[in-house]
Image: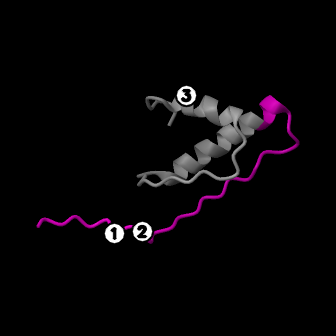
């Protein structure tokens, strides 16, 4: 993840904020790696702000789409 463009900015932003939930409306080809990366950032944030323990990162997948994703040609 850190080699991707913009990941440094995302990591710095996540270090500075304390967000209880991050919702992503996208498809990731390696979402488990994203979860591990977020946990790493949370561990760094804990050291930076000297909090007792890092927040637990839970990986939740929801396969049902709220909106119809089909494309139609009329």
Real-space CA distance between mark 2 and mark 3, rounded to the nearest whole angstrom? 29 Å
Give the residue drawn at x 53%, y 48%.
33
Which mark's residue is nearer the viewer, 2 or 3? 2
Please state if 56 lies on the left or on the right of 64 as rendered.
right
- Name the residue rendered at 68%, 33% in the picture: 15
Which of the marked residues, 1 or 3, is nearer the chain's N terminus?
3
Q: Extreme right residue here?
A: 52
Q: At numbered mark 3, what does the secondary structure look like: helix, strand or loop?
A: helix
Name the element at disc 1: loop
20 drawn magenta: no
Residue under circle 3? 9
Q: Which residue is mark 2?
A: 65
Residue 22, given in percent of the width and then of the height, sits at 60, 51
Q: Position of residue 28 (x, y in %)?
A: 43, 52
Magenta-highlighted residues = 46-74
* Badge nearest the viewer, 1 or 3: 1
Task: Name the main secondary structure of what is drawn in magenta.
Answer: loop
């Amino acid at each position: 993840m850190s080699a991707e463009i913009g990941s440094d900015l995302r990591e710095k932003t996540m270090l500075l904020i304390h967000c209880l939930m991050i919702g992503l409306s996208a498809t990731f080809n390696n979402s488990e790696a994203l979860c591990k990366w977020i946990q790493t950032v949370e561990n760094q944030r804990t050291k930076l702000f000297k909090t007792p323990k890092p927040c637990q990162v839970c990986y939740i997948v929801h396969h049902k789409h709220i909106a119809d994703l089909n494309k139609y040609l009329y």
